Image: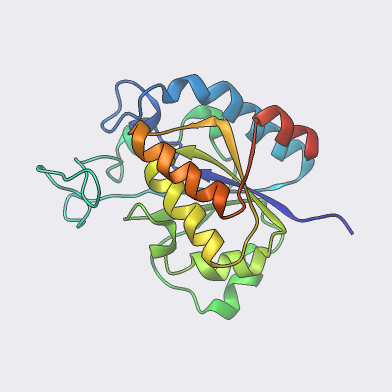
């Protein structure tokens, strides 16, 4: 039996990934070639590609003109703006969007059956604040989740800790991720290693597909 792998793409949106973005993650654009190769290889291999994406409005609790950079951030990825769109390198062709309206969990497996691309929208840096995230994870039931995207010390960290709490095996793609704060990145990655997360390059992941 082949192992079920899911490629989990964290917030690869213009506002984070491009120097002109509203909440640019330093050097994020350096990772786009690796990201593009991961997404293309997943497509070719038929690997499920789940992408999370911020879908903010100015009234969201996370948005502040005086951010603390831990729980609140400046306006970014506002719904309907160019900054909220995914970069071309990681764009999905025909994703199933799962917004914040909760589906009865029993319906989710039928919704995602046969779908290779899924888009999880969120209003908080933690993807599990989307009420459909747990049901999606249960429906996909991956043996391993391959995580890439931004920012390592914020949204990647929240997703990976969430996966670990749910007993999932995680692989982190180091050359397809960047963080906001180097000290926090070091603390996050050290905690992940201790919890059993494996670390890979995009090339190594692609070879395993």
Is 164 drawn above or below residue 186 in the view shown?
A: below
Is 140 drawn above or below residue 76 in the view shown?
A: below
Quadrant of the rendered image containing residue 128: bottom left
Total marks shown come to 0
Q: Picture coordinates of residue 54 (x, y %)?
A: 36, 48
**Residue at x 15%, y 44% (from the top left corner):** 67
Q: Report the colour scheme.
A: rainbow
**Residue at x 55%, y 60% (from the top left corner):** 164
**Residue at x 71%, y 27% (from the top left corner):** 203
Quadrant of the rendered image containing residue 129: bottom left
Horizontal side, residue 151 vs residue 38: left or right? left
Horizontal side, residue 116 vs residue 190: left or right? right
Q: Picture coordinates of residue 84 (x, y %)?
A: 35, 39
Quadrant of the rendered image containing residue 142: bottom right
- Examine the rendering and report whether any part of residue 168 can be seen: yes
- Examine the rendering and report whether any part of residue 85 can be seen: no
For the C terminus, the image quarter is top right
Viewer-nearest residue: 126 or 57: 126
Please identify the residue farthest to the left as the structure is shown: 66
For the N terminus, the image quarter is bottom right
Q: Picture coordinates of residue 46 (x, y %)?
A: 76, 45
**Residue at x 79%, y 33% (from the top left corner):** 207
Is 100 drawn above or below residue 63 in the view shown?
A: below
Viewer-nearest residue: 45 or 147: 147
Q: Picture coordinates of residue 192 (x, y %)?
A: 53, 49
């Amino acid at each position: 039996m082949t192992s079920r792998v899911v490629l989990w793409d964290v917030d690869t949106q213009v506002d984070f990934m491009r120097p002109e973005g509203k909440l640019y993650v330093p050097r994020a654009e350096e990772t786009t070639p690796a990201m593009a190769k991961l997404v293309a290889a997943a497509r070719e291999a038929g690997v499920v590609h789940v992408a999370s994406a911020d879908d903010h409005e100015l009234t969201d609790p996370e948005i502040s003109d005086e951010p603390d950079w831990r729980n609140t951030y400046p306006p970014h990825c506002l719904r309907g703006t160019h900054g909220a769109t995914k970069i071309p390198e990681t764009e999905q062709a025909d994703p199933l969007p799962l917004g914040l309206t909760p589906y009865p969990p029993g319906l989710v497996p039928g919704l995602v059956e046969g779908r290779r691309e899924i888009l999880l929208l969120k209003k908080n840096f933690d993807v599990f604040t989307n009420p459909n995230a747990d049901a999606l994870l249960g429906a996909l039931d991956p043996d391993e989740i391959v995580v890439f995207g931004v920012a390592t010390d914020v949204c990647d960290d929240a997703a990976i800790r969430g996966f670990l709490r749910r007993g999932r095996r995680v692989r982190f793609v180091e050359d397809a991720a960047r963080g906001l704060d180097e000290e926090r990145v070091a603390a996050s990655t050290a905690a992940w290693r201790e919890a059993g997360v494996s670390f890979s390059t995009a090339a190594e992941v692609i070879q395993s597909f």
